[in-house]
Structure formats: structure tokens, C-alpha cells
Amino acid sequence: MLAAVACPPAFAADGTSILFIQRHADDAELFFLFNQAKKEVNFTGRFRAPAGIVPELWDPTTGLRKVVLIYRHRAGMVEMPMQLDPRGSVFVAFRIGPALEHWSSISKDGNPVEASRDFEIVRSQENSSLIAWVPGNYELTSESGKKRTVDVPSLPPALDLSTGWELTFEGLGRKQILERLVSWTTLPEEEFKCYSGAVTYRKHFTWTGSLARADFDLGQLKNIAEVTVNGKPAGLLWKPPYRLDLASALKFGENELVVRVTNLLVNRITGDFALPAEQRHILAFGAIEQYRAGAERDGLLPSELFGPVTLRPAFETPIK
């Protein structure tokens, strides 16, 4: 029907299947996009939108909003390169307002690029900057044809923080040193194998990279992590990818990193099933007898900060 009246669809995603809901508000046209896949997806989002609008991205997990700086107009549509995390989602809001300086295309070393974790364009007041984690020659082109070139020099390699952690099992009051990250269920002590609760990981490291942007990546973990750097809370991570920007908390020289990981209650339940009633840790045990068959089938669930844990410096420069 839309094709018959030459009306494009409200939203389309090139190269992948993205679910969406559209809603009209008094001051904005809103789209909610959801990636059903268990992997990260990159695509070009095409939105039916009139001229004179400015697109924004709203992150439903953090509440942060940012103006989109890479998009282009095509015959009543707005096209923008997009990236969604595994099972990730985002709100896209179109508001009427003055168009900020933005770019319709970007190339790196002569090759066109779309959404990528290799770079990001950010805006502060009236100025735009390029943040890049990969060196190269970046060329930005506006819809009017204006071009800007940014050369990103070689960057130091990511700092590997995967070894040498001191663990504190809070519910046990016990400490453990791990030279490499492994699941608690593989440790020889039975009280560690079946532990459920919070474990604090602590280590010190030296940072000599940029303080403009420093991407911290925990790799894989089960199940929730609270990150603190030099006594400053840096963020709560509960879904992949487990990443944070630590630049505001880092300092040159020695830093203290604390990651508080909390797993599920399942392992303590499984461990209690093997104990006599008088030795069990969970007092209301009768209420969880229903989980016995599942515990016998699944066994202990992996619980840990698995890594690899890395801290990656970035290069930031104004786009002039």
C-alpha cells in the first residue's frame, strides 16, 4: 500500500532485522529499535522524516542522550549508520530545530566506513571532535560537500589487566590471589565452588595513556559488576558489552581498580542440596525444593570475572 502511494516505510534497516515501534509526540517523532540477535549488528537505519529535524540517540540503559553527527537526507528519508549491542536497544528521537554541523560520510585510509567502534564523533558546545582508537587518515564529508581530514597517529597498545587480582569473598571473609582469571567453581575449596554473593576484585596498575578517553573492557563476566577507580564509582555493568569510559576517574601513574562481581543464588542452592539439613546455608530451604531437578541437571553455573580485562587509550582531536 505504501509503495502504491509512493510513501516510504517509517523505518527500514539495511542488512539486518530490527524490530521497531514508532510514536508521535508533541515535540518529537520517536522510534524504539531492538536487536533480537545475540550478536552485535551494524546497519544503515532509514527513517521517514521531514526536512528541518535533528536526530538524537537516547540510551535506555543509562538515560544518556546525544545528538547524531553522522547522517544524510535522501528523498524524504534520514539515513544514519547504526550499531546495536547483542539484544541491545535504543530510542531515536527526531526534533525540529537548527541543524548542527554533521557529516554525511566518513572514510578511513580511502575506504568508506559506517558505524564502527574504531572511532566516534562527539560535540561539545559549538565544536566537534574525533575520538579514534585506530590510527589512520580519516576524511569527513558534509552534505554540502565540505571535507575535513584528520590524521590519527599510532596509539599505544591496550593495557592488559587480566592477571594478578586479589579477591575477597565478602560472604566468607576470605581472600584469594588469582594470577589468571578463572571461574570460582573451578577453585579447589568447596566453599568457593558453591559460593553465591559478591566478590571484590582489586588490583593496582600504572597508567601513562591519554586522559581524554580510556575504554575499559571487562570481557565476559557472570553476572553483575560494579566498577570503582581510585575510590570513585565508575559504573554498574549488567549486560554485554561490559565496557566503560574511565577517563574521568583515571590519573597518571598508579591507580587502584576495584571490580565487585555478584553472581546468582543458584550455586549456593546447588551446594546446599548436597549437605545435611543442619549444615545448609539457606534457612528457607523447603521453598526451593522445586529447583532440585534443575540443579542436578545443570550443576554449578560459571561465576567470575572471566576477562580479558583491557584498558584502551584513544586519540582525540578537534575537527577544524
Image: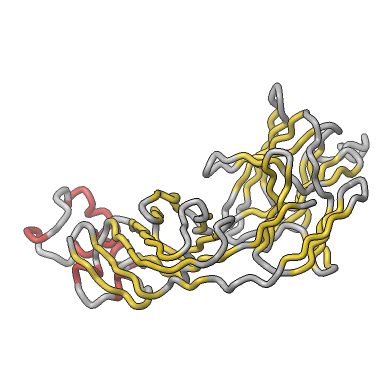
> Height in image: 269 above or below 75?
below
Q: Position of residue 31 (x, y in %)?
A: 69, 37
Q: Quadrant of residue 65 in the image?
A: top right
The type of colouring in the image is secondary structure
> Height in image: 179 above or below 123?
below
Can residue 107 be spotted in the picture?
yes
Q: Going by the picture, which residue comes out furthest to the top? A: 26
Q: Tell me the residue at 37%/73% (across/down).
A: 181
Q: How many marks?
A: 0
Q: Tell me the residue at 31%/67% (across/down).
A: 300
Q: Of 271 and 102, which appears nearest the observer? A: 102
Q: Tell me the residue at 16%/48% (across/down).
A: 284
Q: Position of residue 293 (x, y in %)?
A: 29, 62
Q: Going by the picture, which residue comes out furthest to the left? A: 278
Query: Can you say which quadrant of the picture contains the N terminus?
Result: top right
7 sits left or right of 33 in the view? right
Q: Quadrant of residue 190 in the image?
A: bottom left
> Height in image: 34 above or below 40?
above
